[in-house]
């Protein structure tokens, strides 16, 4: 938050140096909560990305889903069917399989969206901070414009544009890209602002001045010298944003601009289940909801730990 | 300094124009407003005529220029669905959204700051750990689900609080309405404020905690300790005071996003605010409302940003120096 | 003893009085908003029902949807069918106290056909309204029209004087630059006055003590609030915050009925939900079949028809609340006896597809709304699964109605290969279905077949349809309608699915008659203490 006065210091240790220096492994092993969180995240990622081999059925293949199996409760309840451990949804999909597949979709959307946001944000932040002046003003004003558009609206707009430009495009094919772009375009500002702030501080330091005097080209200085020193906080934002992106995707599904119900993400499953909250079919919303909450919680805990571990002053 | 202010004002104006342009250009793809206005059995000549009266057959540039010209005179056109001036519709809905935003901001500050302070001071106590984890649960579920669950618990099961609307409102002056003067108005505010404020509360709690931890490590706190000041005085007189400046700044910036993100909360609780109006407008492709709403939100953001920047420039001599150097 | 009785009586009287004062306020929540009070701007069932409280037409429809006299006491048709004479009710007053006369009818007839009105089809453009005296109006037609007044129950009569005094002579145009008085205020002859109206937020109706007729209900005040979120609407009913909601999502019906303080009124709706094929393009827009259109082959259409397991859709998606339909019209509007649905038979479907030259099926796109009809998105998803089982791969494009209609309707260029749509004939008459849904689209300048998105076309059906319009003998007319339907059914023109169910949530304290056109009319409601 508070910028340290630009003292005539030496080049600060780079990110990796700091990571090694901070006995990051030791701090990881010290915190039981973090270890549990890491294990959970690992399990969920494996479950998601190996879902075609783990899941008993393929919920995305309509030929294997039978409507007659719809709304079956979990196996341990009256009327449950051992074929469907966690029960089925309103189309007769096995909820356990649907959650695994849905988790994969959600994570892909989240990871790609956040990666896009970080790429845009870091690039613009570096440019704004390093070059300053007009470029800085322009980029920061673009950031202001962007803040006006909530992710929901961006998704609606992009969804419309995609359909307008690619006439006859099917939502099934475009929804994923629409979500990734919407999340990318609505999350980049945070990265840009953070990077810009630290770059403003770094660019006046001796090592950057020296590089400039040597005659290194600006892009090289930004990438090789400035970036490694300002990227620390970005890792924290990345983890927290991944959690936020998954939540945003769920919210967009609720508003009808998320992924189609034929290829449900975790968020789509929740908004489908949301309809059955009062009718007693609690499992349709509960299991995907709990999965989402556990994922977000674990990722956030990892983010917390990472922030503390990377902050030398907090140790 | 004056040059700086003028330049920032000019930039803000450009921002507003850019928002208007982007919004306007994209609206054309969202759907066809004429389809929404006519019935299925309306003859085609009438549809074409309507399109012409609305000026939808003219080039985008002309449509945009006309829009800006009118907007400059505070005329945002007439809603396609309601056939009422957008400005009066938004004006009617604004108090609801502003009141909700204010209450949820208040909630997030009043709950978030003490929790943040506690978790910073008692870093390793079990209660602090519970606070930290529980606050994360609040942001681990999508807003709409939290809202529905709160309704299910407090309205349907317990019957304590209303599930929708603003309760009884009282009119103040010509256009402001408030729910703060009636018991039912207060009751109606509770669930939506919590739903909307939960996310900000977590944010503020974590921010306060982080800032407190930083401040507690600074030399002057160490010095104060060394001087033998009471712990309580150090914590609340010095540390917290220093923490609050950035917290308030962030909270100020969040107010804008609270208003923007009230869309979901207002939908779940049928809160008669601008967000609900906007979402309906999107579904019905009511371009005048969409455009005016976006302009309003961007105006809000730009103003808050401008004020924050100016305040910083006044407060921080270092920044003032950079500004002078430009 | 006698003292005690007295006391009890007094208490009872007091309770009655309190009850009377309290119970007559009814709180009603609907999914949709009441946008404008101008009765000629939004032609949509819910809005028409709302405005049926302050306004009335010359005719009305009763609880059974039969046409009844309203502002017109009676009417007669000349032998050649070219002149209709309407006798207006005397002594009726508008809410502002002015008298209802023939001038108001003439004025309303002009206004409803003026630019900006969405009700222009209520009266033929060429029909002339002639004032005979203050309480008699002649309608002169250029061609006989036995269903002239079929939709006049929602052609609401406005006051000429009031409109002129308030600059509301023209229907509020969509491009208006200033608010129209008529969109924020109402002055009708109906049983309820508008007490206050906040567009999209809240509307309060107060009983019109001077109403010309005794109403069935006992409601003195109606507070209407839109609640668009399904869960919130149901919650508001369950917690007793509102007395009537429409609609109740069908999956929540059991929960509401089990709650003890509310119940769900269900009944068949007149809307028919169906699937349509593009039968006109030489190549489908979104399909793996190139160079030809598989839907031009009746065998493919039959294969699709027989692949749809309507009973499972009924039991699982509709939770039993639908009536599978053999025709494109509801049984309440035309007797469907004698027609049956082609049997669900996936094996037969596969065979038919193979015979048509698609032994391995094919791939195509399907368009579907997901917020328009009861569980529309789920129905389409189920259909996708059923077609997958006969080897047809369907790419479902389920969208909100704004985007869906923009794509598939006429202004969007009918860009669809296979779609789901619902239709209620506005006139409650088969002619509307035969003309709009089953009529050929190929005559330029004609509105025939405008909602026949896939352009099913059979000239013989068109010929019959034209005869049906002018035939006034009911028996003959019905025979011709039946003949026309038979032709369309034999050709598998569409896949009619079902009539969906109405589901209104009503507090146990309220009694309410349910009309099959889904109009919630609260002058039928009684609320007890």
Image (cartoon, grey):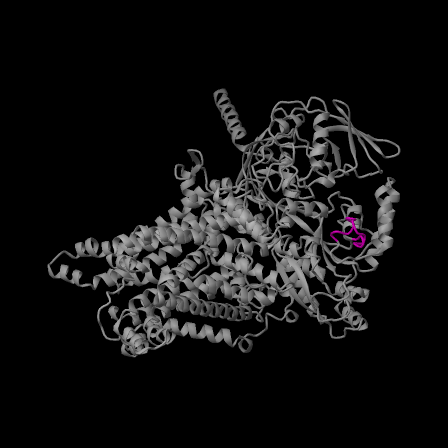
Please provide the residue range marked out in magenta: C438-451
Q: Is residue C178 left or right of residue A7?
A: right
Is the residue C198 above or below the residue A110 in the image? above
- Is B243 left, or right, of B135 in this rendering? left
Q: Which is more toward the observer, B187 or C13?
A: B187
Q: Report the number of numbered marks.
A: 0
Indicate the position of residue B190 as horizontal and vertical percent values.
Answer: 41, 46
Residue lying at 35% horizontally and 50% vertically, measured from the top left: B6
Residue B235, above or below B52: below
Residue C315 in the image: above or below residue C143: below
Where's residue B297, x and y in %?
A: 45, 50
Q: Nearer the viewer, residue B290 or B132?
A: B290
Residue B264 seen in render = no
Residue C349 appears anywhere in the view: yes
Q: For this view, does A172 lie left or right of residue C135?
A: left
- The reply to whether the magenta stretch includes residue C445 is yes
Q: Quadrant of residue A65?
A: bottom right
Q: Is residue C396 left or right of residue B86?
A: right
Is residue C443 found inside the magenta-colored segment of the image? yes
> Does residue C184 lie above or below C285 as drawn?
above
Going 21% across and 54% down the picture, which residue do you hit? B236
Furthest-top residue in this view: C2
* Residue C313: x %, y % from top left: 68, 59
For the C terminus of chain C, which image quadrant? Answer: top right
Front one among C510 and B286 = B286
Secondary structure mostly taken by the magenta-highlighted segment of the chain: loop
**Horizontal and vertical percent position of residue C110:** 71, 33
């Amino acid at each position: 938050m508070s910028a340290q006065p630009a003292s005539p210091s030496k080049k600060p240790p780079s990110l990796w140096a700091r990571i090694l220096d901070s006995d990051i492994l030791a701090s990881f092993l010290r915190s039981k909560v973090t270890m549990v969180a890491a294990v959970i995240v690992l399990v969920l990622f494996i479950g998601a990305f190996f879902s075609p081999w783990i899941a008993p059925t393929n919920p995305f293949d309509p030929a294997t889903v039978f409507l007659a199996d719809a709304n079956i409760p979990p196996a341990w309840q009256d009327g449950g069917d051992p074929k469907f451990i966690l029960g089925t949804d309103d189309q007769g999909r096995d909820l356990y399989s649907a959650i695994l597949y849905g988790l994969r979709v959600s994570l892909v959307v989240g990871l790609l969206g956040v990666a896009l946001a970080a790429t845009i944000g870091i690039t613009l932040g570096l440019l704004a901070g390093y070059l300053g002046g007009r470029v800085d003003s322009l980029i920061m004003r673009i950031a202001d414009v962007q803040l006006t558009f909530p992710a929901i609206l961006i998704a609606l707009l992009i969804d419309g544009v995609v359909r307008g430009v690619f006439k006859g495009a099917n939502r099934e094919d475009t929804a994923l890209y629409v979500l990734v772009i919407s999340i990318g375009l609505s999350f980049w500002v945070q990265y840009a602002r953070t990077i810009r702030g630290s770059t403003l501080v770094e660019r006046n330091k001796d090592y950057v001045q020296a590089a400039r005097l040597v005659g290194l080209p600006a892009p090289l200085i930004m990438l090789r010298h400035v970036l490694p020193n300002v990227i620390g906080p970005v890792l924290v934002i990345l983890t927290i944003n991944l959690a936020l992106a998954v939540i945003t995707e769920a919210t967009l599904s609720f508003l009808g601009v998320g992924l189609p119900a034929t290829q449900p993400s975790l968020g789509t499953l929740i908004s489908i289940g949301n309809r059955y909250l009062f009718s007693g079919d609690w499992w349709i919303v509960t299991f995907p909801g709990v999965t989402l909450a556990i994922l977000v919680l674990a990722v956030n805990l990892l983010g917390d730990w990472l922030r503390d571990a990377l902050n030398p002053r907090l140790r | 300094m004056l040059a700086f202010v003028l330049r920032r004002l000019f930039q803000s104006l450009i921002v507003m124009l850019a928002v208007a342009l982007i919004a306007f250009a994209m609206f054309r793809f969202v759907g066809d407003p004429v389809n929404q206005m006519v019935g299925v059995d309306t003859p085609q000549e009438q549809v074409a005529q309507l399109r012409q009266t609305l000026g939808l057959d003219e080039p985008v540039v002309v449509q945009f220029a006309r829009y800006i010209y009118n907007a400059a005179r505070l005329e945002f056109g007439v809603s396609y669905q309601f056939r009422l001036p957008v400005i009066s519709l938004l004006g009617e809905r604004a108090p609801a959204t502003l009141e909700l935003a204010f209450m949820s901001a208040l909630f997030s500050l009043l709950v978030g700051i003490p929790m943040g302070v506690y978790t910073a001071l008692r870093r390793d106590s079990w209660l602090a750990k519970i606070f930290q984890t529980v606050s994360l649960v609040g942001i681990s579920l999508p807003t709409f689900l939290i809202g529905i669950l709160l309704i299910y618990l407090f309205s349907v099961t317990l019957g304590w609080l209303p599930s929708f609307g603003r309760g009884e409102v009282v009119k103040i002056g010509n256009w402001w309405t408030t729910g703060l003067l009636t018991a039912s108005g207060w009751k109606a505010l509770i669930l939506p404020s919590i739903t909307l404020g939960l996310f900000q509360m977590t944010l503020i709690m974590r921010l306060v905690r982080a800032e407190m931890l930083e401040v507690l490590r600074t030399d002057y706190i160490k010095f104060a300790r060394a001087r033998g000041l009471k712990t309580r005085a150090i914590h609340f007189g010095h540390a917290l005071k220093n923490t609050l400046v950035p917290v308030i700044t962030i909270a100020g910036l969040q107010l804008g996003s609270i208003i923007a993100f009230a869309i979901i909360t207002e939908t779940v609780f049928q809160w008669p605010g601008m967000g609900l109006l906007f979402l309906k407008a999107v579904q019905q492709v009511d371009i005048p409302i969409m455009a005016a709403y976006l302009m309003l939100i961007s105006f809000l953001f730009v103003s808050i940003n401008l004020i924050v920047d100016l305040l910083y420039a006044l407060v921080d001599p270092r920044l003032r120096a950079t500004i002078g150097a430009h | 003893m006698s003292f005690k009785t007295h006391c009890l009586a007094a208490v009872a009287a007091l309770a009655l009085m309190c009850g009377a004062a309290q119970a007559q306020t009814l709180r009603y929540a609907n999914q949709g908003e009441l946008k404008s009070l101008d009765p000629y701007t939004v032609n949509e069932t819910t809005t028409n029902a709302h405005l049926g409280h302050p306004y009335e037409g010359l005719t009305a429809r009763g609880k059974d949807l039969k046409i009844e006299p309203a502002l017109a006491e009676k009417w007669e048709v000349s032998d050649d069918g070219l002149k209709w004479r309407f006798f207006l009710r005397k002594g009726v007053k508008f809410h502002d106290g002015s008298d209802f006369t023939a001038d108001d009818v003439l004025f309303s007839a002009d206004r409803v056909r003026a630019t900006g009105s969405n009700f222009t089809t209520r009266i033929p453009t060429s029909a002339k309204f002639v004032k005979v005296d203050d309480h008699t109006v002649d309608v002169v037609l250029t061609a006989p029209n036995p269903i002239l007044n079929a939709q006049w129950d929602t052609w609401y009569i406005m006051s000429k004087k009031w409109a002129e005094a308030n600059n509301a002579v023209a229907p509020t145009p969509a491009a208006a630059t200033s608010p129209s008085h008529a969109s924020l205020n109402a002055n009708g002859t109906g049983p309820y006055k508008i007490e206050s109206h906040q567009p999209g937020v809240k509307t309060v109706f107060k009983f019109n003590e001077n109403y010309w007729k005794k109403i069935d209900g006992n409601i003195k005040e109606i507070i209407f609030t839109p609640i668009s979120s399904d869960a919130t609407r149901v919650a508001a009913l369950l917690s007793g915050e509102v007395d009537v909601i429409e609609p109740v999502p069908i999956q929540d019906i059991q929960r509401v009925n089990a709650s003890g303080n509310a119940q769900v009124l269900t009944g068949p709706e007149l809307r028919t939900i169906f699937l349509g094929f593009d039968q006109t393009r030489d190549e489908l827009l979104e399909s793996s079949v190139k160079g030809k259109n598989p839907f031009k082959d009746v065998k493919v259409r039959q294969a699709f028809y027989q692949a749809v397991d309507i009973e499972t859709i009924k039991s699982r998606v509709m939770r039993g609340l639908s009536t599978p339909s053999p025709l494109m019209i509801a049984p309440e509007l035309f007797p469907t006896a004698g027609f049956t649905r082609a049997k669900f038979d996936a094996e037969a479907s596969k065979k038919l597809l193979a015979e048509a030259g698609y032994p391995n099926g094919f791939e195509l796109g399907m368009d579907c709304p997901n917020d328009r009809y009861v569980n529309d998105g789920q129905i389409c998803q189920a259909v996708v699964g059923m077609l997958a089982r006969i080897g047809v791969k369907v790419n479902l494009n389920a969208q909100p109605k704004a985007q869906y209609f923009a794509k598939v309707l006429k202004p969007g260029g009918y860009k669809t290969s296979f779609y789901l749509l619902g239709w209620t004939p506005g006139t409650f008459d088969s002619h509307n279905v035969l003309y709009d849904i089953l009529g050929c689209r190929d005559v330029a300048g004609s509105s025939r077949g405008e909602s026949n998105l896939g352009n099913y076309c059979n000239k013989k059906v068109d010929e019959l349809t034209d005869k049906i319009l002018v035939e006034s003998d009911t028996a003959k007319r019905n025979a011709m309608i039946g003949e026309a339907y038979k032709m369309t059914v034999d050709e598998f023109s569409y896949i009619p699915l079902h009539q969906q169910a109405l589901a209104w949530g009503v507090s146990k304290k309220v009694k309410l008659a349910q009309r099959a056109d889904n109009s919630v009319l609260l002058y039928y409601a009684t609320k007890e203490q």
